[in-house]
Image (spheres, helix red, strand yellow):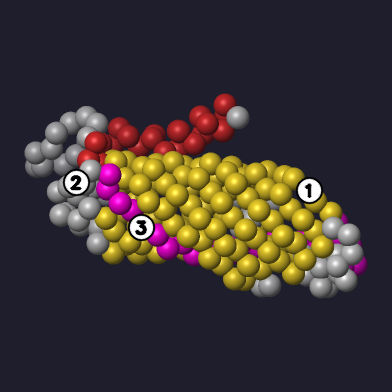
Amino acid sequence: MKKLICICLGIAFSAMTLHAQDDEGEDKEKGFKKENLFTGGSITLSFFNGQTLLGANPVFGYKLTDWADAGLAFNFIYNGARDYQVFNDKIRQTVLGPGAFVRLYPVKFLFAQAQFERNFSTLKYIPPGGSPTEKNKANANSLLVGGGIAQGRQKGSNSFYYISVLFDVLKDVNSPYVNVTYNPDNPAQQRKTMQPIIRAGVNVGLFQGRYR
């Protein structure tokens, strides 16, 4: 658990030093500024190849520079899928876990994002015909990489909206963002496919004048 906390904090705040490297032509106060703190979050929605993914992702972060944000996140996901191992079977999965993210804005309305998550899941397997279920617990690391569009992230605005598309590049078999299919002739053989993760959300500055 200590290692997990170190990873999350490292990802979220490793770019903090960028805050002291603002453009020379700008007259900005150095050091921590409370008006750069923000909260908010997103909802997660994905339908792909017989799989349904619903979730929420509240965040707490800091505006490092005009082109970079970083922070901590918490993850909740419900994941349901059909034909997981054999035809007409089902899984029902709930996921909880902490994470950390970095967003980079090459322009005000576009961003690239990387988000590390450590997810703890409970999975219920329902065989065909609804016979007695099996319940298993697992955990997995996920590294979500992608980008999105922001609306309203400009000077004079205290909040903005965004939508993003992310992919779990680690493809852990226990990840809620990965679709796993099995060879019916050899169940030991599996194919892991990254699902597109669509998140729409809002960032709200905690103090007046975050972007002034």
How far apart are the alpha carbons under marks 3 and 2? 16 Å
Q: Which residue is mark 1?
A: 136
Stretch of the chain drawn in magenta: 182-206
| Picture quadrant of residue 161 | bottom left
Expressed as whole percent of the image width and height from the top left, the position of residue 60 reads 39, 43
Q: Amino acid at mark 1?
A: Asn
Secondary structure that dominates the magenta span: strand
Expressed as whole percent of the image width and height from the top left, the position of residue 206 reads 28, 44
Expressed as whole percent of the image width and height from the top left, the position of residue 48 reads 62, 71
Q: Is residue 197 magenta?
A: yes
Mark 2 vs mark 1: in front: 2
Q: Amino acid at mark 2?
A: Gln
Crowd rating for badge 2 (residues with CA inside 10 Å; few <14, some 14–19, many 20+)? some
Q: Is residue 179 magenta?
A: no
For marks 3 and 2, the one nearer the N-term is 3
Q: Which residue is mark 2?
A: 208
Asked whether, in this view, residue 148 is left or right of residue 6, the answer is left
- Determine contact: label 3, label 2, CB under 8 Å: no
| In-front residue for pair 94/82 | 94
Q: Which mark is residue 202?
A: 3
